[in-house]
Image (cartoon, rainbow, N blue to C red):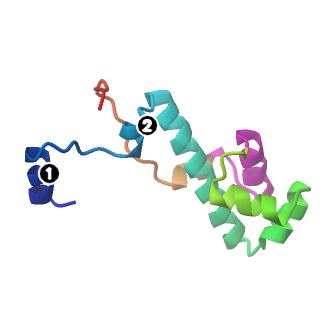
Amino acid sequence: MNKAKRMALERAGYRIGDAEDFLQLTEEERRLVDLRVQLIKTIRRLRQRRRLTQQQLAALLQSSQSRVAKIEGGAADVSLDLLFRGLFAVGGGLSDLLAVRPRSVRTKSRQPV
């Protein structure tokens, strides 16, 4: 959103924020969301780099293709344990998570929206 539009909306009484502000996530919850997103992006990137299909990754995980699709789709019922197993199954490691740039972490104190 451009600055002029943002200022006009704020003058009209609207509050500008993001989904995390609307959901009133704590800093820890924001970081957990960022970690999950980084894991998901890294798993998919490494799977594609290795030219593996979702079916082949599923075989490595002893799971199903639909489960791998849920991993890559960011389904809420996918555990961090399974995400890390997926990362390691595609040959990744913790250092690969750094290749995906996370959103900037807010350091100021949070105000209620």
Q: Secondary structure at mark 1?
A: helix
Residue at image location 72% in from the left, 58% down from the top: 70
Residue 58: numbered disc: none
Q: Is residue 92 visible?
A: yes
How would you rate the neighbour count of disc 1 (Cα within 10 Å): few for under 14, some for 14-19, many for 20 or more? few
Q: Is residue 103 above or below residue 31?
A: below
Q: Which residue is mark 2?
A: 23
Is 90 placed left or right of 39 in the picture? right
Q: Does the magenta portion include 93?
A: yes
Q: Position of residue 47 (x, y in %)?
A: 71, 66
**Closer to us: 78 or 90:** 78
Secondary structure predominantly adopted by residues drawn in magenta = helix
Q: Which residue is mark 1?
A: 9
Is 10 placed left or right of 31 in the picture? left
User: Which of the 4 quarters of the picture holds residue 108?
Assistant: top left
Q: Is residue 90 visible?
A: no
Q: Earlier in the sequence, mark 2 or mark 1?
A: 1
Residue at image location 40% in from the left, 45% down from the top: 19
**Closer to us: 106 or 2:** 2
Q: Position of residue 34 (x, y in %)?
A: 51, 44
Q: Is residue 24 above or below residue 87?
A: above
Q: Position of residue 16 (x, y in %)?
A: 24, 45
Q: Are marks 2 and 1 in contact (CB under 8 Å)?
A: no
Residue at image location 9% in from the left, 53% down from the top: 8
How would you rate the neighbour count of disc 2 (Cα within 10 Å): few for under 14, some for 14-19, many for 20 or more? few
Q: Position of residue 29 (x, y in %)?
A: 51, 32
Q: Name the amino acid type tagged 2.
A: Leu
Q: Does the magenta portion include 15?
A: no
**Closer to us: 95 or 44:** 44
User: Magenta segment, which residues?
Assistant: 79-94
Spatial CA distance of label 2 from label 1 is: 21 Å
